[in-house]
Image (spheres, rainbow, N blue to C red):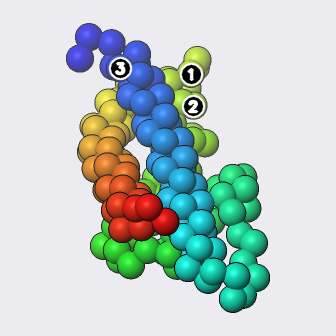
Amino acid sequence: MADVRESYKAMTLRILSNFQLLELTLKLYIGRAYELIGLSLNGRMHFDYSVADVENFPLERLLNVFGKLNGNRELLERLNKLRAQRNHVAHESLIIVMGTIYDKEVVQKKHGEFFYLEDELTECLDLVVEETKALHSGFAGK
């Protein structure tokens, strides 16, 4: 690795971007599920939830709501494992490449860990997209 610091920074930013995409996709899933619930109730009961109710939720709360609306337990388990890693990436990952506390060995170790994290995150993001598509197609025309 020619410049592990720059490679690590680039990977960290990609991971953070993918976590943002994951949060957006979860919000879209939840919003669509709320729409479909409202349609299914057909006015028989008041239901006033919408995507606006979750637009400022952090990942943990989004996963809690997603878990109540989606029965894919394996996916939810994988997403919950990512949650703790997301907090580390968001709050601590760039500190180790800054200024005087830069430690090349630590960065190389984290870079290797982030390689697998990025793969898992990408797979989970793709699975949430598939769940969202299935939700849409399952109620096409509604």
Q: Residues within 10 Å of mark 1 (few under 14, many from 20)?
A: few
> Disc count in the image?
3
Say whether disc 3 or disc 2 marks the residue closer to the N-terminus. 3
- Identify the residue at image location x=61%, y=83%: 41
Q: CA distance from mark 3 to mark 1?
A: 14 Å
Q: CA distance from mark 3 to mark 2?
A: 15 Å
The residue to which callout 1 is attached is 98
Amino acid type at image mark 2: Ile
Say whether disc 3 or disc 1 marks the residue closer to the N-terminus. 3
Task: Classify 69 as above or below 11.
Answer: below
The residue to which callout 3 is attached is 7
Secondary element under disc 1, as helix, strand or loop, is loop
Determine contact: label 2, label 1, CB under 8 Å: yes
Q: Position of residue 84 (x, y in %)?
A: 50, 58
Name the outermost residue toward the left: 1
Q: CA distance from mark 2 to mark 1?
A: 5 Å
- Identify the residue at image location x=73%, y=62%: 53
- Name the quadrant containing residue 52: bottom right
Q: Give the left or right position of residue 44, taking residue 60 as reference.
A: right
Q: Position of residue 38 (x, y in %)?
A: 63, 74
Secondary element under disc 3, as helix, strand or loop, is helix
Dot in front, 3 or 2? 3
The residue to which callout 2 is attached is 95
Residue 74 numbered mark, or none: none
Amino acid type at image mark 3: Ser
- Identify the residue at image location x=49%, y=42%: 21
